Image (tube, grey):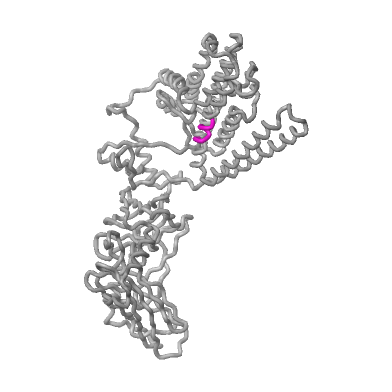
Amino acid sequence: MKKLSALILFALLPLTGFSQSHTKVALVGEVNSIQPGQPFWIGLQMIMEPKWHTYWMNPGQGLPTEVDWKLPDGFTASKLYMPTPEIIEFAGSNTYGYEGEILHLIKVTPPAKMNTDSITIEGDVSWLECKDSCIPGSDEVSLTLPVEDGARSIDPAHVELFAAARKHLPQETPHTFRVINRATESVTLQVSGPALENPVYLHAEPDIFDPDAKQTFVEIEGGFELTIPLLEDETAPDVLSGILVLASAKHQSVAVTTDRGDGTPEVTDTPSPAGTSLSQTTDPSPPAKLSANGLPASTQAAIDEISSWGSVDLAGSTEKKRTLPLMILFAFVGGIILNIMPCVFPVIGIKIMGFVNQAGDDKSKIRLHGLIFAAGVIVSMWVLVSVLLGVRAAGESAGWGFQLQSPGFLTFMIAILFVLGLSMAGLFEIGLSMTTVGGELQQKKGVSGSFFSGVLAVLVATPCTGPFMGPAIGFALSASIAATFAVFTALALGVAFPYVLLSFFPTLVQKLPRPGPWMETFKQAMSFLLFATVIWLLSVFGKVTSIGGLTYLLFGLLALSIGGWLYGRYGNPAVAAGKRRTALVFTAAMAVLFGYAAIQGANMVETKRTLTTGGSTVKKFGMDFEVFSPERLVDLRTQGRAVFVDFTADW
């Protein structure tokens, strides 16, 4: 959009033939003579009338100054080395350019042998000059210099002119530059080193960063971070190569070059003093030090500082000591409440179907199903806690619901719930010995199905937390292994309690309608709860992998649905044996195809996002929130300011 507006601006310019240029251009030489094979410097001098301006290599809005060279055989000319521009507001937008007089430097390299007494360098210069309106300008420039075999001599008339031009070029600096975050809408540049006054980053290439958007400056220990907004639909470059313009003096800036993203420094070049050749230099500062977990050292220091604060209640007093019996009670009550959270809705539907199927059974069988369901909840919770503790012992970060960070686990849950949903919707039937849903509605068996329902209840419940659960889980994850198992066992008992209660008071179950045709409609309606959970899990899968990974998995689910249709249509005993075997083969093939697509999708994980993205603000709850960074939080708390942190996770 910004590029298009610049083109429209140019199209509306007055016709060049009817316009008088307000800029004078000329070529000037730094030396009185040249020698074969010895590079030398010339300058493109531009003198603008008052209030008129021309543009830098990245004009922001406008067109840069360019030269089409006509050089003698064997000669080469470098790019224009442009002094630090000013930020000039024009036509409601920020532009980067020059007013008054400016000198762009060019390094010229002659061949090793020259059979002439003099050479002439020519060029066609084009520029855009603006005041109240804009006019494209062009002119031919030339410079003739003698060729001599002796030592070169500096032209005294131009010493101060070239010295001033070099002073206004971006300066080398002891600072360290590092990109710490490449987001879809901005890039965050971390600068370590001495303080700089009101720096503004200008990229060397146009049409990438938004010149009109405010860049956010945040001080951190040992430097600062600058968040630079991108133009809409633009992608952050691998290397930031540009300048930091300073407010301290006109035409003062610091050269910025980051690595390519793989730790390899980008090679840059800067004009060297007269009498020497162009030097190839790299950033003299080492990369910013990283902590053991890959975070910048300043970020890790801020996290350690935050961890040392401990916690207080909202009244500001020291937090009351939490005892194990109290946390066990909290976990039990939290488990009961968890049954009405959205995550557990699918299991509620499955278990209600189980109780309906059991409505005519004797009391002992109903109680058995309730206890088996509780056993499934408890055993699966123990397995989950064991894995969690194992992951934490290995040095990895893990908490409640940690498995949802795993594409493999998400794929497993999506497949299970999707297949159950297809079965409950009537596409095919799964026997009660597996799930207690589907199959013949009058079948009264299915002890293994009750156990499976308990396992599924734990798996789908882990994304959710409810009242009382937060303190209990926080306590358990920092307590001993025995205390951790005690708290999570209480949580499992709370989840299972309503179902066990119903099984031990069969009069409540017997108040349910007797099994009949209405159950088929009810079962199909409950399938939509499963599909809703699948959609949510797919969104999580897409966030922890990529849009490409999500696409693969969706095609895998299409294969599963085809397999389910083949099984339901041709896999039942009423179909001829040959057709049934063929259907089973194709169903298995669809399952294999799902597995292949799921593996491909799970492996398409995007680059891990960093913790710190500070600087920009977002509108939420009608207020402006700063994007979180540990350094910024430490800074605000050091100032004695209260901070509200709103956080969530994509798993």
Residue 74 is situated, as x and y percent measured from the top left of the image, at 47, 82
Q: Residue furthest front?
A: 517
In this rendering, position of residue 557 left or right of residue 468: right
Q: Does residue 475 appear in the picture of this structure?
A: no
Q: Is residue 426 magenta?
A: no
Residue 135 is situated, as x and y percent measured from the top left of the image, at 30, 71
Q: Is residue 199 above or below residue 109?
A: above
Q: Is residue 560 above or below residue 489?
A: below
The quarter of the picture where the N terminus appears is bottom left
- Of residue 609 and residue 309, the one placed in the foreground of this image is 609
- Of residue 282 and residue 561, the one placed in the foreground of this image is 561
- Of residue 359 and residue 415, the one placed in the foreground of this image is 359
In this rendering, position of residue 171 left or right of residue 583: left
Residue 178 is situated, as x and y percent measured from the top left of the image, at 40, 54
Q: Which residues are magenta?
A: 530-536
In which quarter of the view is residue 612 placed? top left
> Which residue is drawn at the image coordinates 33% and 26% (left, top)?
319
Q: Does residue 141 appear in the picture of this structure?
A: yes
Q: Residue furthest left?
A: 50
Q: Is residue 535 magenta?
A: yes
Q: Is residue 158 above or below residue 441?
A: below
In which quarter of the view is residue 592 placed? top right
Residue 356 is situated, as x and y percent measured from the top left of the image, at 57, 16
Magenta segment's dominant SS is helix
> Which residue is drawn at the image coordinates 65% and 36% (left, top)?
563
